[in-house]
């Protein structure tokens, strides 16, 4: 029974990571690429690590898998947000849309 | 049966990391390459987790933790370097020129 659950989670995580890579390859713009990669990849890797904890079925493996999921949930969105912020600051070209108004700087606050 | 499923998933993730490597090679700006390297490192983390499930050894999870730390630190340091040591003209190499030509064509 546990093998069925972890196998389903492995298939779902692999498909989500593949969707993230396809989005990285196909989308037209840096910000959309960061959007696809960050969200789908975070969910995919966390499903794979949950399957890891269910497959080994010991307390140490499950705790370390949960710790890794927490760490990845902290770090991957921060990296994606940094890429988006630098792309905004450099005013890179976008797909079909002009950039909105300026970000408020520190002096204006 | 279960090991065959895990092997097929490892093959799919290897193909995915090759696709991210393609984006890292052809990416029009430097930020695309940084993003693609982030994707490659997370695909490698997933491959290590699946390999641990095949071999039945729990101790690969430390490798997963260390590799995710290396991926995060390398992404942040690449972005720091690109913001502080590289001119903004070099960052938007080919894409910026396209935008300038669009602006010129719009104004004319």
Image (cartoon, rainbow, N blue to C red):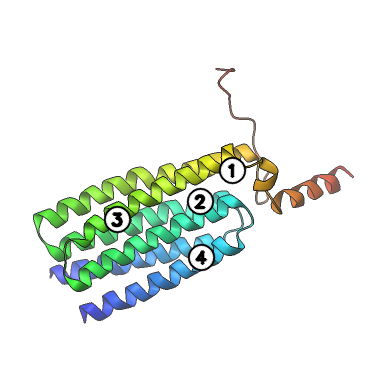
Q: Residues within 10 Å of mark 1 (few under 14, many from 20)?
A: many
- In this rendering, is residue A4 above or below A29? below
- Which residue is pictured at 61% across the width and 37% down the height? A89
Whether label 2 touches label 1, CB < 8 Å = yes
Residue A26 visible in the shown view: no
- Which residue is pictured at 65% across the width and 48% down the height? A94
Q: Position of residue B80 (x, y in %)?
A: 51, 40
Point out which mark residue A46 bears: 3
Question: Which quadrant would residue B73 be assigned to in this image?
Answer: top left
> Judging from the image, what secondary structure is the residue with disc 3 in?
helix
Residue B52 visible in the shown view: yes
Dot 3: chain letter: A
Give the residue at mark 1.
A87
- Counting residues from the N terminus, which is met first, the one under dot 2 or under dot 1? 2
- In this rendering, is residue B14 above or below A88? below
Point out which mark residue B21 bears: 4
Give the residue at mark 2.
A34
Q: Position of residue B1 (x, y in %)?
A: 21, 82
Q: Position of residue A105 (x, y in %)?
A: 58, 24
Q: Is residue A77 left or right of residue A84?
A: left
> Judging from the image, what secondary structure is the residue with disc 1 in?
helix
Label 3, label 2: how far apart the Cα atoms are: 18 Å
Q: Is residue B9 left or right of residue A101?
A: left
Question: Which quadrant would residue A12 be assigned to in this image?
Answer: bottom left
Point out which mark residue A9 bears: none
Label 2, label 4: how far apart the Cα atoms are: 15 Å
Label 4, label 3: how far apart the Cα atoms are: 22 Å
């Amino acid at each position: 029974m546990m093998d069925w659950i972890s196998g389903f989670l492995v298939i779902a995580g692999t498909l989500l990571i593949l969707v993230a890579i396809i989005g990285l390859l196909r989308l037209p713009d840096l910000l959309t690429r960061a959007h696809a990669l960050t969200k789908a990849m975070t969910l995919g890797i966390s499903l794979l690590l949950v399957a890891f904890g269910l497959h080994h079925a010991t307390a140490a493996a499950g705790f370390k898998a949960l710790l890794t999921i927490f760490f990845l949930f902290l770090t991957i969105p921060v990296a994606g947000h940094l890429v988006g912020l630098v792309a905004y600051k450099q005013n890179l070209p976008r797909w079909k849309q002009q950039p909105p108004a300026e970000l408020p700087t520190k002096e204006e606050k | 049966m279960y090991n065959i499923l895990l092997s097929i998933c490892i093959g799919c993730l290897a193909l995915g990391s090759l696709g991210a490597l393609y984006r890292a090679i052809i990416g029009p700006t430097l930020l695309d390459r940084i993003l693609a390297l982030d994707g490659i490192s997370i695909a490698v983390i997933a491959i290590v987790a699946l390999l641990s499930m095949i071999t039945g050894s729990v101790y690969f999870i430390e490798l997963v933790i260390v590799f995710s730390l290396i991926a995060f630190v390398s992404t942040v340091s690449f972005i720091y370097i690109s913001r502080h040591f590289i001119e903004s003209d070099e960052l938007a190499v080919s894409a910026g020129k396209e935008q300038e030509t669009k602006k010129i064509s719009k104004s004319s």
